[in-house]
Amino acid sequence: MAKRTQRIGIYSGTFDPVHSGHISFALQAIEKAQLDGVYFAPERIPRGKRRVTHFAHRTTMIRRAVRPHAQLHVLELEDKRFSVAHTLPRLMRQFPGATLVFLCGSDVVAHMAQWAHVKTLLPKTELCIAQRHNETKETVLRSVMGLPVAPRAARIVQSYAPKVSSSQVRKALREKRTVRGLLASVKAYAQQEWLYI
């Protein structure tokens, strides 16, 4: 019997901080895309963001957030930010023979056509896309259809997590109040390290 090809999810982003929406999407992606695991890959210097919490703090918060979930992991990329030209070959060497499935929000897909070398990335990988609360599946599909080349496959995952953003979590921590989506492990670490004050 032929050995099943490993399916690895790669979830790149800022995660400043990681919240329940990120974790929920990763777990849903494992189920919907039949993944063996999801690797959170925080960007050291995210595109278009000037003030970002230090990479080491963001990575530690992700490690704490994924600890209860055996199929969720952290991947520390050498690159300052995800790039098709440099990061994709490294990932293919790290997971030889595996099918790589990139997890992303629908907002990322809308701008993916502008990425350098995107025509190299898409035919080699699959996409698992988080549908935002204010969007329809048709809207997300239009973004996928607008890509310069088709990915090997694309799945749309409707989020069942509370509507939350990292900026809302940062504001809640700064104001010392609770907000839906704030993970207890992240809150404890942020308070311990005096983050977001």
Image (spheres, rainbow, N blue to C red):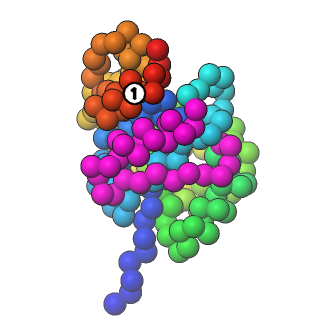
Residue 101 location (% of width, % of height)? 48, 56
Front-most of residues 121 and 94: 94
Front-most of residues 44 and 8: 44
* Left or right of 114 on screen, residue 122: left
Which residue type carries mark 1? Gln
The quarter holding residue 115 reads top right
- 19 falls in the magenta region: no
Please tell me which residue is depicted at 28% across the width and 31% down the height of the picture: 184
- 72 falls in the magenta region: yes
Number of numbered labels in the structure image: 1
Direction front: furthest residue: 192
- Is residue 53 at all visible to an observer of this figure? yes
- Please state the extent of the stretch shown in magenta in the rendering: 54-81
SS at mark 1 in the image: helix
Residue 59 location (% of width, % of height)? 49, 42
Please tell me which residue is depicted at 59% across the width and 26% down the height of the picture: 52
The quarter holding residue 177 reads top left
- State whether residue 73 is above or below residue 18: below
Residue 108 location (% of width, % of height)? 54, 36
Q: Which residue is mark 1?
A: 192
- State whether residue 87 is above or below residue 63: below
